[in-house]
Each structure stands twice: as C-alpha cells, then as structure tokens.
Image (spheres, grey):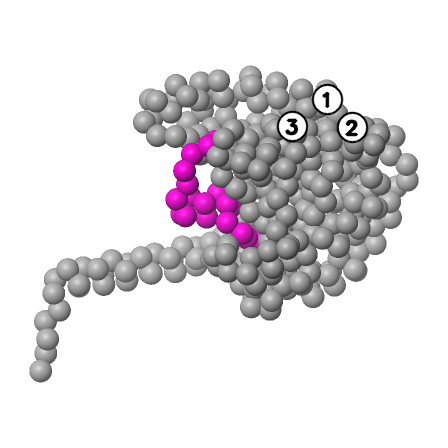
Amino acid sequence: MTTNRPFSDRVTHEKALFKAIARVANKLRNFVRLLWGDPSFLVMSWLARFVAVRETVARRGSYEPSGTIEATVMHAVAGVCPVESPAQVAALIRANGYYEGFSLRPDILAGLLDFAQTNPCYVNRNPDHPFYIDDREQLEQTLGAPILVAGYLDSHESCAAYQAMRADNYLLDVASQYLNHRAVYMRGELAWGFPAPNTLEQKLKMARVYHCDINDYKTIKFFFYLSDVRAGDGPHVYLQGTHLHRRFRHQWLGQGCASICDRTLVDIYGSERVRIVTGPAGFGFAGDPYCLHRGTVPQHSSRLLLQLEYGMNPYRIWYFSGL
Ligand SMILES: [Fe+2]
C-alpha cells in the first residue's frame, strides 16, 4: 500500500536536500581552491588541529633571540604596566594560552585613532559600503537597522603607526619566541564593534562564540584596544589553557569547535578557566588563537580593536579569498 505524503512535506524535504547538496558543493569548491592555491596550507589545516602535531612542529624550530631591543611601540609605565621581556611573555602564553599587559605608546595610539577617525570604514566589512565613523548614527537611520561591525579592510596598512607596530622588534621577538620560529606577518585588522543585538548566526559569523583559529601549525595574535573596554563593552574572552588541554574529540573537530555551544564548552573545561580581558584604550594582549576564545557583543559603547597575526610559514592562500 502506498501513502501520499503531503505536498508541503515534499517541498520541505526537497529544500533540505538542495541545501545539503549546496553545502557539499561549497566544501568541494573550497577544497579544490586550497589544493590549487597551496597544498601545504591544506595539509596544515588538517594536521594542525592536533595538539601533538602543533607542539612537535614548534619544538623542531630553532629561533634564537637577537639580543637587546632598543626601541618599541610599547609604553613602559613603571609599577603600572611594566614591559616584560619577550621571553617572559612567550612563557606565559605557553602556560596559559594568552598574555595580557601590553600598553601602547601614546603617539602610536594617537596615530591609530587619527587614522580611524579620518578614513572610511566599511559596514560589516563590505567594500561596497564605506562610511566615516562620525556618520554612523545617520547611516543607521538611513539603513533602518543598527550596524554590527565595521572594518577598515586593508587600508590600515597605509597607517604609519600600524606599520611601526607591524615591524616592531619587541612584538616580533615575542612572536618568534612563542612560535620558536622566525615570525612571519600574516595579516591584521582594525575594526569597530557596535552595541546592537546579535542573532546566533551573526555571533557565529563574527567569532562571538567560543572557537579556535587554525591558520598555521602555530600562530600568535596581538590585540590592542583602541577604546576603553570594560565588561559590557565587548571584551575578548579566553578559556585559559585550552591550547594544550583539549579533549581529543575537540581536537578532531578543529575549527568546527565553534558549533559547540558556549555553555557546553565552559562546563567541560571549567568556569575557572574563563578569562575576560578588559582594559583602557592602548591596552594590549596576545594569545595563541588555537586556545578557545571569543569576542563578545558590546552592550554599552563602541569598541575599536586592532589585531595582528604572525605565524611560522608564508602561505599563498587562506580560507577566505584575501590573505
Ligand atoms: Fe578567533
């Protein structure tokens, strides 16, 4: 005996099937793009999800610190925010997955803020929608919706203060000592986060759920708050120590850990590992992006964040189209 399924059921079923096919096709297309672009990146993206592989590759490096660092973009304030040696910072990142306590020199901070004020940023990082930060409220009224984030795409590379940071010997030495390889600059971003409600999908897209990033066997990311960031202003959050202590299933998942809900991850690894990083404008921190972390949604004030990432190897391709 045959039963006729209702028409609406068949439509739902077909839609789900098309979505699944589109997902597989997308994955296949991306696989071919990475394979064609740089097979070593493809191999790394799979192997570097395992702690044992990451640590073995790092141990095989042979970075020797160059000696005294004469000048840096860091600001030393005795007793308040001492500049720790690159070796000390690297050791703390090895132990905890992150370090907090950098402070930018006032002239560098002023240069970055001036750049952010006088150059267009882009609605949700869309190159077709530039605007000046002072025009945000007016633009939101025109759009009829709040803007969630705005980035400067690659234009910050033309900022002298950013160039000073990118080539800073102190930051390079921290990165190289942590990676145990001469650090290779990968990319950076200057971006605003604005107070606005986020859906789960938007949080996933904007790295506002716990996740890890695998851009090389090991990388290090430096972050600098360019606006004051208190608990409700969208601080960065780490799950301390999860760069070394990670359940095998979560290693296997790699960047797919983002699909696990935040509450579950905190329950598994322990709420005592949750570290919320707050600080005034100019405050900086660095972390291994493999350590589980997330951004948060600003509730009160807009947050301006600068980040720079260094790795071990130069690759010709990345998950996204740009490098
Ligand atoms: Fe991330």
Q: Of helix, strand and loop, which one carries label 3?
A: loop
Q: Nearer the viewer, residue 86 or 36?
A: 86
Q: Quadrant of the N terminus?
A: bottom left
Question: Does the magenta-highlighted stretch encompass residue 214?
Answer: yes
Magenta range: 194-217
Q: Is residue 114 above or below residue 4?
A: above
Q: Is residue 157 above or below residue 235?
A: above
Q: Position of residue 72 (x, y in %)?
A: 80, 30
Instruction: Give the residue number, with chain letter if any, for mark 2.
Output: 75
In this rendering, position of residue 47 left or right of residue 130: right
Neighbor class of circle 2 (other Cα within 10 Å; few <14, some 14-19, many 20+) is: some
Tag 2 or tag 1, which sits nearer the N-term? 2
Q: Position of residue 296 (x, y in %)?
A: 52, 42
The single residue placed furthest to the right in the displayed view is 67
Q: Position of residue 4 (x, y in %)?
A: 10, 71
Q: Which mark is residue 281?
A: 3
